[in-house]
Structures are given as C-alpha cells and as structure tokens.
Amino acid sequence: MAKFKKSSKRHLPHQSNGIKKFVFGLLIVVLALAVLGGFWFLSQLGPKDVDYRNFDYSLEVPESVKALQAESLALESQFEDALALRAPEAEDILLLKGALDKQESYLSQISGVDSEAQKRLVNLRERYHNLAAEPLRLESLDLEGEAVALVAEKDYENARIKFREAYQKQRQVNESFPESSAYDVGRATRLERQARYLMAVPLLQRSLELEEEADVFIEAKEWGAAEERLQQAMALQDQLNREYRGTNQSSVARLERLRVKLVGIRSGQSYVEVQRVVQLADERRAANENLEAAALYLEASRLQRQLNEAYRDSPYASSERVSEYQRKSQTAESFELGLEIERNHDLMKKLLAERRTYEAAEVIAALRRDIKQMEEAFPRSSLNDEDLQLKVRYLNLVQNDLGFIQDRIYDALLPIPEVDGWRMLRTEVPQALYSLIMGTNPSRNKGDVRPVDSVSWVEAKNFCERLTWILGDSVRLPTEHEFRQALGPLRYVVLEDLVWSVSNAESVPQAVATKKPFASGFYDLLGNVSEWLESIDRFDTEDARHIGGHAQDRLESIFSVPIREAPRGERNRLTGFRVVVKVD
C-alpha cells in the first residue's frame, strides 16, 4: 500500500497576513463604489434643471374670466362713489361684498399667478370685514354699557342678559369677520365671564342671607331652624363651587366653614347641657356645698368628653374644658383639706415667729402629711401650691435645727440706728451659716468663719427666702439707706482698725468680726467683701448693686463707700452679703 506523506512546505505567517489585507482592501473599495452609486441614483430622482431660455411666460385667460374681474372693479367703483357721498350703508357694504366675491371667483379660475389680483383680494376682504363688523361691534359695546348700568342698580338678572347678548355679538364678529380690527377673543371671554359672574351673585347673596338667619337662630338656641337654614346655605355654596369655578363667589373655604358651623349647631344642644350642669356646680360651690359641686363638675367633664368624641370639628369641642372641669371638681372636693392646710400654715408661721420651734415641728409634720395627701388624692386641684410644698419640704428637712438657727440669728442681730421694725446681722453672713441654711458653700476663700463669697444676688435672695421660712418673719437684703445708717459718720474713724483692705488682708477676705466694730456695733461694714443691696428701685432686668468695698480695695477707695453694679446672676469671690430681719 502506498503511503502519502504530508507536504513539508509550510506557509509563513507574513504570507497569510498579506492575503487578509488584500481581501479587506477589496471589500472597502466595493463598499465605496456602492455608496457612490446610491448617491447618483438618488440625484436622478430629484428636481431637474430648468431651461429658462425656452420658458413661456404668457398666460391665456379666457374672456369670461376676465369679465369677472371687470365686474369686480365696477362694483368697487360704485362703492367708492357711494362712499364719497355718505357714510357706508348696508347696500353699500353689499356692493363691496359683491366685488370681493367676483375677485375671489376670478382668482379661482385662472391657471397662473396674478400677484396684483391677489393683493387686491386681500385689501377687499380686510375692508369688507372692517365695515361689516363695525355695526356688530357698536351693538356689543352698547349692550355692555347697559349691562354695567344695570349692575350699578343691582339688577343682576337683566345685567346678565345684556352681558350675554354683548358676548354673542362679539363672538359673531370673531367668527364671521376675523380680518377686521374688531376681532377680539379676549373681550368675548371677559363678557362671558361677566355673565357667569352675575349668574353666581344672586346665589351667593341668598346663601349669605340664609347663613345670617341661621346665626340668629343659633343665638336664640333654636337649633332645628338654624340647622335647616345652614343646610340651604351650604347647598347654594356647593352649587357655586361646582358650576361657577373661577368666579369670586366660588369658595371651598367658605363651604368648609359652613360645614364646621353645622357641626357646631348639631353639637349645640350638647353644649347647652354642659353649660347647664356647670352653672349648677357653680351655684353649689358658691353655697359652700363642695361635695355636690364636685360631683356636678365631674358630670360636666364627662358630658364635654362625649361632645368632643361625637363632634370633633365642633367649635364647642375642647379638651381644655374637660381638664378645667376636672380641676374644678377636685378643687371643690379638696376644699376642706385645703382649709386645714391653710390653717396649719398660718399656725406654723406664728409658732416660728414666736420661737416655739418644738411645737412648730409638730405642725410641720402635719402639714407635710396633708400636702402629700393633697398631691396624691387631688393632683388636679388648684389648691396644690408648689411654693408651699417646697417650703414645707425644706422645713421638714431642717426641723431638728430650727431652734439652733433661730438662736444664732437672733443673737447676731442689732438694731439699725433710726430705722424702726428691722434689725441687721452684725456681721457678714459667714460660710458656716450659709452652708447650714443652703446646704452648700460656693465660696472660693474657704473658712467657716470667713464671709461667704462667690454668691450671686439671686442666691443671696434665696438665702433670705429660706431664712424667712425658718424665722416666720420677713428677711431680706439691706437697703442703701439702712446700710449707711448702720455705718454712721466716718469723719473721725480710723479705718485701719475697722477694715480689711489691700494693705492688711493679703488680698483675700478674712474671718468676720476680727476687726473692731463700728460705733453702731456692726462689723466689717467696709472692706473684706462688698455686700449686696436690696433692689427696691430697680426693674428685675437691671443690674443689682453691692456696697462697701472689699479686701483688694485701697483704704482711700473704701473711705468713699464705693457702690458697684453687677448682673444679678454674677458671682465674684470678693462679694458677699448680710441680711436684715423684720422684728414685730
């Protein structure tokens, strides 16, 4: 058997690539020729060149067609003759219409273009439209004027008819004579809107009248008649909203307001019942029949809650009234307990003012018990007094120290020369006393016997308030007059013996009452710390004042008794205070 061997000749890579490039180039050439051929074919389908040298400009118009233009010219001539003698009348306008019709017939029958004849046709049409539309325009203007006069007389129905007729005339002008200067789409729209507006006016007037009648019946609490009138008013307003949208009489807001008023009418009887029960409760309350009044107020609260749930949109719906009636109910029910709290409060103040602190402690415990009962059983009662709660809670906290505090304060008081009814603390308030009363010590220069410092005017007033609770008598800051009366004249005073200043205090306040007292017996009126004054002649928004200088002032400055001002909430490590106490 013969065996065939494969050829050992191999194609080189560059020979294969050359064949591919040749085929690809051939395809591009064929594609380009195809595109060019397509363009040539399309060009043969387009317009051909015209040889104007052989063009025939002549128009052959038949004599019968020429006669139409001649007739048109003759009719226009007759119209011009008539116009020279008088204002155009109806028969004159018909002559112009005939000339227009003949000209249109002529142009429709010629085979070529006659630009002059076309221009004449446009002029004839515009002239005819203007003349034919003028009577209609004048009639429309007259009708509009009559309508305006009728509106002024409030004869809205006849005014509406006139506006409608004026609209029809203007519409006829717009449709039949669009080439005239009287053509006005905007005027037609306005006249139509005016007619629609005047159709809506009587409906709105009647709706308003019905609402006024309903208001009268509401005032008289005749709910059935009021509801009937209001429903009729709503029906008319609803008609206006549906059929006359875009007019001033259409109002969704008014319809919603009427709906709310209707709900109010339907809930009015319930509201009247609520008010009747409240009035009975007020009468029982005035007669001091508190338990009956409490029950009636509670019933009024229940009825008001029912009204709120049934008529949520009613003007008589009010969650605030529910809370108010509940408050009145608990206030009436807790009245006797409130009286007991008030009596014990007065007794506590009396006992504290008489320095009978052991008996006062027993009253404080009773007050604490009664106030807690008031808070828990009658949380809505207006007899709950937050200030009294705070006061009794504080006194209950310090009741074991009441006698000690009172003794310490009264032992430290001195009369103020030529000032009756008040005594002043002989020293600045020391830090130990401040801590005892307030439970805190803000001072930067620590020391129990040093004056309290870094205390604001507001904090000083809070100290006075708490001390008032403890003593049962008024406590406040001294006035400038009281301070100067206690200070007395300084002419022959040796300040170095009485005052802590920058020259001897090492720039920090020293222990109170370590210098000699002034002639009145008071210590450290000048120097050491500047002292807050009562603001009896200033608004709450104004700065407060402090007096007397401090440990960093020179003696020359202290001798002038300096008065400085500062915001009421400001703290300063060189500012403290002392107090005055009312003495019966």
Image (cartoon, helix red, strand yellow):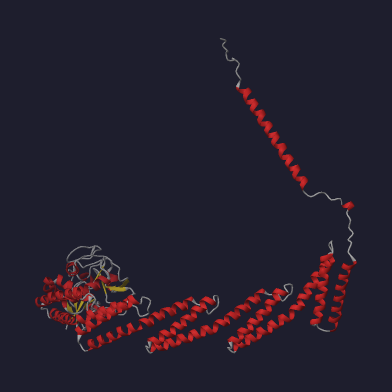
Q: Nearer the viewer, residue 298 or 47?
A: 47
The single residue placed furthest to the top in the displayed view is: 1
Q: Position of residue 365 (x, y in %)?
A: 12, 74
Q: Nearer the viewer, residue 53 or 566?
A: 53
Quarter of the image with the C terminus in it: bottom left
Q: Is residue 218 left or right of residue 6?
A: left
For residue 3, above or below residue 120: above
Determine the image quadrant of residue 379: bottom left
Q: Residue at x 82, y 75 (%)?
A: 98
The single residue placed furthest to the left in the displayed view is: 358
Q: Position of residue 182 (x, y in %)?
A: 72, 76
Circle count: 0
Any part of residue 539 in sight: no
Determine the image quadrant of residue 3: top right
Determine the image quadrant of residue 497: bottom left
Any part of residue 506 in sight: yes
Q: Is residue 171 left or right of residue 200?
A: right
Q: Is residue 20 left or right of residue 498?
A: right
For residue 31, above or below residue 173: above
Q: Is residue 212 left or right of residue 396?
A: right
Q: Position of residue 163 (x, y in %)?
A: 63, 82
Q: Nearer the viewer, residue 229 or 435?
A: 229
Q: Position of residue 338 (x, y in %)?
A: 18, 80
Q: Nearer the viewer, residue 109 or 233?
A: 109
Q: Residue at x 66, y 29 (%)?
A: 23
Quarter of the image with the N terminus in it: top right
The single residue placed furthest to the front in the displayed view is: 1
Q: Residue at x 68, y 85 (%)?
A: 142
